[in-house]
Image: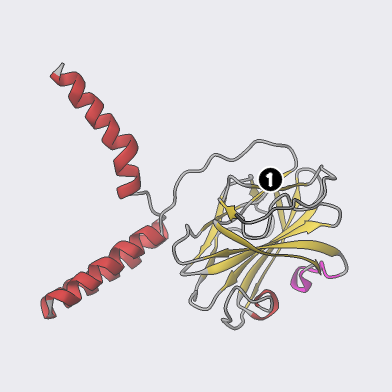
Amino acid sequence: MKNDNFIHLKNFLRNSIIPYAFPHINKEGWKFVAVFALITALLAWMWTPLGVVGLILTVWCYFFFRDPERVTPQIEGAVISPADGKVQMIAKVRGPRELGMDNEEFTRVSIFMSVFNVHVNRSPASGTITASSYVKGKFFNATLDKASSDNERQLLAMKTQTGHNIAFVQIAGLVARRILCFVKKGHILKAGERFGLIRFGSRLDVYLPLGVEPQVCLGQTMIAGETVLANLKSAAPQMKGKAG
């Protein structure tokens, strides 16, 4: 009986407590955690209360780079959210000029990531990257519409397995100062596959082809790699919703 209780406790800790208290983090984050920890040790040596502040910031840094596993829906034509965060804007716009898509109209869905969201970005669909462009820019607040055209950004165009052309853009924000993208032209991605991250607050824009309406609402919370944003093979009207 004691052994059974011990096994149950061990399984409980392994499956319930540990994953939340000590989540897996992206390898890009370890060097930052190390720097924060080193500064914390220095501050604690200087004055204990400063060390406490440093410890809080170190824990925040650790959780910022968390990289949880996600279960991606296997739905033909589905476009999956590439980022954790909230839908902030939905607009009809021309495609990104940098990707040669400005002669077509798209529906742009903007997802804002706060400094408390998971910042690992995932491919919104399965397909091949047909174009890539990095643009140096400014660091306006990512909630502003002009961030799509003025801020530092990494743009990717994709030909999906269903034959549609979509685009998705990593946009640096007011605090973000580093966009990481792990793919380039010719790279084949699966829906939900990790393709990059942005450090410390930012935004992801997804460009849907004309006629494909988003199945999410303004203010909706998105989960990267899991939330279905739209379906390329569906003619369903734009989803309507009300905050409550």
Q: Secondary structure at mark 1?
A: loop
Q: Is residue 197 above or below residue 231?
A: below
Which residue corresponds to the image point at 59% horizontal and 46% vertical from the top-left? 192
Q: Is residue 26 visible?
A: yes
Quadrant occupied by the C terminus? bottom right
Name the residue at the front extreme.
244
Residue 97 included in the magenta stretch of the image: yes
What x and y, as percent, mark residue 54? 24, 72
Where does label 1 land, which residue? 126
Query: Residue 204's image quarter?
Result: bottom right
Q: Nearer the viewer, residue 173 or 194?
A: 173
Which residue corresponds to the image point at 88% horizontal and 69% vertical from the top-left? 103
Tell me which amino acid carries mark 1.
Ser
Q: Is residue 13 above or below residue 206?
A: above
Residue 80 included in the magenta stretch of the image: no
Name the residue at the top extreme.
1
Quadrant occupied by the N terminus? top left
For label 1, the crowd category at 10 Å Cα-Cα, with few meaning under 14, some 14 to 19 and many 20 or more, is many
From the viewer's perspective, tell me whether residue 103 is left or right of residue 224: right
What x and y, as percent, mark residue 219? 62, 60
What x and y, as percent, mark residue 173? 55, 75
Which residue corresponds to the image point at 27% horizontal and 66% vertical from the top-left? 56
- Per the rendered image, the range of residues in magenta is 96-102
What x and y, as percent, mark residue 121? 55, 57
Q: Nearer the viewer, residue 218 or 56?
A: 218
Query: Residue 48's image quarter?
Result: bottom left
Which residue corresponds to the image point at 67% horizontal and 55% vertical from the top-left? 242
